[in-house]
Image (cartoon, grey):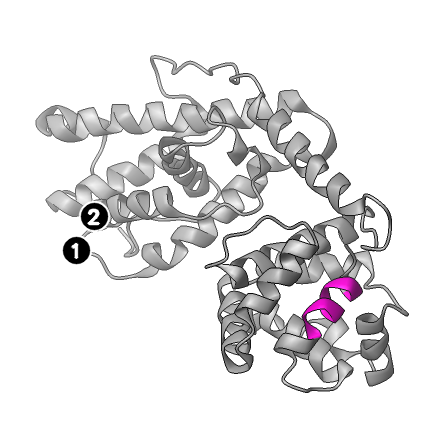
C-alpha cells in the first residue's frame, strides 16, 4: 500500500472536511514528534505538492519518509486518530476499511492499527518496496514479507558468549571507576577505590554483577559484528541509542546519591522501548539484563554518569 492509498482510504473519516493539503499536514504533523515538526521538510512543501501526495500524483521521497519514520510518535498519532474517529463516529467504518485492505487488527484498537499501518508504509517507502493497493497481491506479499523477516530474526542463533576475565581490562576502567564513585557517594567515602571493597562486601558483590552485565552486552556487540552485513551491522549502536533515549531523563533527575541514581537508571532501562532494534525479535539478542548491561557501555561512552558533582 502506498501513502496515497492510505490517505484516501481514511480521508472520509478523519479529515474533518479539510482540504487535501491541510489533511496531509494533519497526518504527518500528528505522526511525528512535536520537536521534529520545524525541521520536517515535507511539511513545508507547497499546497499543490501536498495535494499530489494525497491524490497519488507524487510519492513521498525516501529521505523524507526516513525523517518522518525516525521521528515518529505513535502514541500521539493514535490519540489524534481516535479523536478524529470519535468526532465522526467512524470507528466501525475505519475497521471495515482495514478489513477490506486485508489488515488484521483488533476492532477495539483501530487507531493503533492505522498507526502501525502508516509506520509500515513509511518503511516500505524507505526500502523501495511500496506498492499500490491496486497492484494484484500487493497486500498479501507485504505481510508475508514482514512475517518472513520476523521469523528469520527469531531463528538467529544465540551469539557466542564473551567470557568475563578474572581481572578487569582497560576497556572496563571507565564504568568501574564510575561505580566506585557511586559507592563512595553512597557511603561518603572519597575517593573510593578497589581496596575499599573489602570493607563493603555488598558492593564487592555488586561490582561482580556489573562486570557480568558488561560482558553480556559485549556479547551482543561482538555478535552484531559477526553478523557483519546488511541492515544489522549497526544494531548495537541502535540498541545503545534507544536505551539512552529511554533512560536519560531518569539519569538527569535528582537522586539521594550516585548509587541510587545507577539503580534507578537500570530499572528504567528494562522498560525502555526498542522500536528500531531489529534483533529484539529474538530472545537471544535482547532481555532486561542486556538492556541494563548497555548502560555500562553508555558510561564508557561518556553518555551516563552516576555522580554529578565533582569529586
Q: Residue furthest right?
A: 57
Q: Is residue 6 magenta?
A: yes
**Would you say the magenta stretch is mainly helix, strand or loop?**
helix
Determine whether 290 is above or below 97 in the image. Answer: above
> How packed is label 2: few (under 14 Cα within 10 Å), some, or many (20 or more)?
some
- Depth check: 129 or 70 in front? 129
- Quick one: SS at disc 2? helix
- Give left or right: position of 189 versus 309: left
| The N terminus: image quadrant | bottom right
Task: List x then y, in percent, for residue 46.
Answer: 83, 83
Residue 197 is a magenta residue: no
Percent coordinates x, y for residue 242 in the rendering = 50, 48
In the image: residue 239, left or right of residue 40: left
When the figure is inspected, residue 67 is found, relative to residue 212, above or below; the finding is: below
Residue 256 is tagged as 1
Question: From this viewpoint, is residue 145 visible?
Answer: yes
Is 272 displayed left or right of 238 in the figure? left
Instruction: Please give the name of the residue rendered at 49% of the width and 77% of the height, measured from the top-left corner.
Output: 86
Of 289 and 81, nearer the camera is: 81
Residue at left offset 52%, top offset 82%: 87
Name the spot of residue 93 as percent of width and height, x first.
60, 68
Q: Which residues are magenta?
A: 4-11
Q: Secondary structure at mark 1?
A: loop
Q: Which residue is mark 2?
A: 260
- Residue at 69% across / 61% down in the picture? 67
The reply to whether the C-beta atoms of the residues labelled 2 and 1 are less than 8 Å apart is yes
Q: Residue at x 28, y 50 (%)?
A: 307
Is 222 drawn above or below residue 60 in the view shown? above
Residue 32 appears in the rendering: no
Task: Please state the total of marks drawn on the protein image.
Answer: 2
Query: Distance between the Cα atoms at labels 2 and 1?
Result: 6 Å
Residue 175: x, y in percent? Answer: 37, 36
Amino acid at each position: 500500500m502506498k501513502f496515497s492509498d492510505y490517505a484516501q482510504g481514511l480521508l472520509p473519516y478523519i479529515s474533518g472536511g479539510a482540504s487535501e493539503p491541510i489533511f496531509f499536514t494533519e497526518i504527518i504533523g500528528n505522526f511525528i514528534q512535536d520537536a521534529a515538526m520545524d525541521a520536517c521538510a515535507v511539511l513545508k512543501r507547497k499546497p499543490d505538492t501536498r495535494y499530489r501526495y494525497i491524490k497519488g500524483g507524487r510519492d513521498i521521497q525516501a529521505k523524507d519518509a526516513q525523517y518522518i519514520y525516525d521521528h515518529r510518535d505513535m502514541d500521539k498519532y493514535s490519540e489524534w486518530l481516535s479523536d478524529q474517529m470519535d468526532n465522526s463516529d467512524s470507528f466501525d467504518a475505519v475497521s471495515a476499511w482495514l478489513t477490506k485492505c486485508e489488515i488484521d487488527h483488533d476492532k477495539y484498537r483501530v487507531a493503533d492499527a492505522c498507526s502501525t499501518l502508516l509506520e509500515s508504509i513509511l518503511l516500505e517507502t524507505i526500502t523501495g518496496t511500496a506498492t499500490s493497493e491496486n497492484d494484484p497481491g500487493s497486500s498479501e506479499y507485504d505481510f508475508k514479507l514482514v512475517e518472513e523477516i520476523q521469523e528469520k530474526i527469531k531463528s538467529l542463533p544465540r551469539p557466542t558468549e564473551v567470557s568475563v576475565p578474572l581481572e578487569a581490562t582497560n576497556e572496563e576502567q571507565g564504568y568501574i571507576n564510575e561505580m566506585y564513585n557511586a559507592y563512595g557517594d553512597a557511603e561518603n567515602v572519597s575517593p573510593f577505590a578497589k581496596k575499599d571493597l573489602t570493607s563493603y562486601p555488598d558492593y564487592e558483590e555488586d561490582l561482580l554483577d556489573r562486570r557480568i552485565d558488561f560482558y553480556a552486552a559485549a556479547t551482543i556487540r561482538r555478535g552484531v559484528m559477526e553478523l557483519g552485513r546488511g541492515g544489522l551491522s549497526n544494531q548495537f549502536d541502535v540498541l545503545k541509542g534507544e536505551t539512552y533515549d529511554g533512560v536519560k531523563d531518569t539519569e538527569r533527575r535528582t537522586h539521594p546519591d550516585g548509587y541510587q541514581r545507577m539503580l534507578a537508571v537500570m530499572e528504567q532501562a528494562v522498560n525502555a522501548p526498542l522500536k528500531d532494534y531489529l534483533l529484539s525479535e529474538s530472545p537471544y539478542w535482547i532481555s532486561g539484563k542486556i538492556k541494563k548491561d548497555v548502560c555500562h557501555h553508555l558510561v564508557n561512552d561518556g553518555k551516563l554518569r552516576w555522580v554529578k558533582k565533582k569529586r
